[in-house]
Amino acid sequence: MKIEIVKGTREDRLTATRDDGSVAQCTFPKKGPVPHDAVHFFVERTFGFRRGFWGMVAGGVSPDDVGAIASAAGHASASKAHVPGEEIVELLQAERLVECFEAEIWGGPAELGTLQGVADAGFAQSFGPSVSLDQARVDAVRSGLSDFSAAWKALETGQSMRLDWREAE
């Protein structure tokens, strides 16, 4: 699946062209220096998630519908915390890891043990299984995000970055 993320002023826009030729588009508000869905890309690719945000989009789900699917299947929130449905476990695991790496974008890298502890707290809050972190995968996510971030910051409004999603083997 080919992904294009266009830099906007208040929100960014993504277009995903699936391997079957179908297209999904959405806009999303800026949440930080790197688009949230780009962080998902590097986390999900590196950790081999097939049913994270990008795997769901590649499988035909509209990006705008992912949140509704998560909510219906038990996405943990203050008002609705319970064990999630199996169909969204990887989505929630990816989200918790994305939060960890977004925190690093703002505050700098953490030691592996600290990063694992923060991730485990997020997994527990989502009532889902933990994902074991290892230095090689953490370094791979950080490297991808560093390269993407540098290129993203250099873009003018209206310019875009392209990513190529391939399902984990």
Image: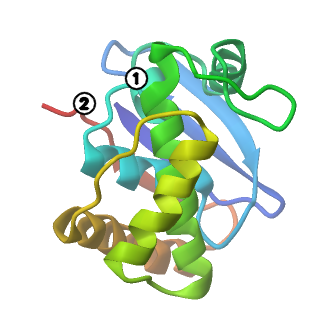
Residue 127 versus residue 95 in the image, above or below: above
Specify which label sits upstream in the sequence, 2 or 1: 1
Residue 158 versus residue 88 in the image, above or below: below
Q: In percent of the image, x 52 and y 65: which residue is there?
A: 118
Residue 90 found in image quarter: top left
Viewer-side residue, 20 vs 114 = 114
Viewer-side residue, 75 vs 155 = 75
Element type at mark 1: helix
Instruction: Say if residue 146 shows up in the picture.
Output: no
Q: In percent of the image, x 73 and y 59: which residue is there?
A: 8
Q: Are the residues tagged 2 and 1 within 8 Å (C-beta)?
A: yes
Colour style of the rendered protein structure: rainbow
Q: In percent of the image, x 55 and y 77: which residue is there?
A: 105
Q: Position of residue 120 (x, y in %)?
A: 47, 54
In the image, 129: left or right of 27? Answer: left
Q: In percent of the image, x 40 and y 23: which residue is there?
A: 58
